[in-house]
Image (cartoon, helix red, strand yellow):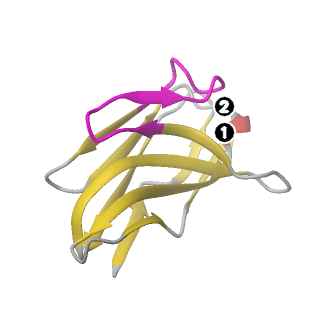
Amino acid sequence: QVQLVESGGGLVQAGGSLRLSCAASGSIFSINSMGWYRQAPGKQRELVAAISSGGSTNYADSVKGRFTISRDNEKNTVYLQMNSLKPEDTAVYYCNADVRRRDGSRYLYWGRGTQVTVSS
């Protein structure tokens, strides 16, 4: 079994910053890509940013230049540094990880989410 636990969400004023963390633990052999998604009320879940095991990144156009994704492979942790936050960034943020388990199986795991609220 593998668990992903997010932390770092909260309430911040527009223009502020937050740093999200997501730590994976359990029966992990290796992790391929890791990513952050978000879901605002009444909207579909959308990709925010993703990072490969080699460090290649991609971002949603709406966050380019403001958000930075990074990872620590030794800690099986992915981070999302969010700067210049806007009210439209308000959402529940979820991390995911493409995990190869020690038994050889491969599965996409999701965290439970952390709320980010940006006030105007």
Amino acid tagged 1: Asp
Q: For the stretch drawn in magenta, what is the main secondary structure?
A: loop
Residue drawn 58% across the image and 48% down it: 37
Q: Is residue 120 visible?
A: no
Q: Position of residue 102 (x, y in %)?
A: 21, 73
- Mark 2 touches mark 1? (CB < 8 Å): yes
- Does residue 54 belong to the magenta stretch? yes
The picture quadrant where one finds residue 51 is top left
Residue at mark 2: 86
Q: Which residues are magenta?
A: 50-68
Residue drawn 31% across the image and 61% down it: 23
Q: Secondary structure at mark 2?
A: loop
Q: Position of residue 85 (x, y in %)?
A: 59, 31
Q: Position of residue 82 (x, y in %)?
A: 48, 34
Residue at mark 1: 89
Q: Is residue 46 left or right of residue 8?
A: right
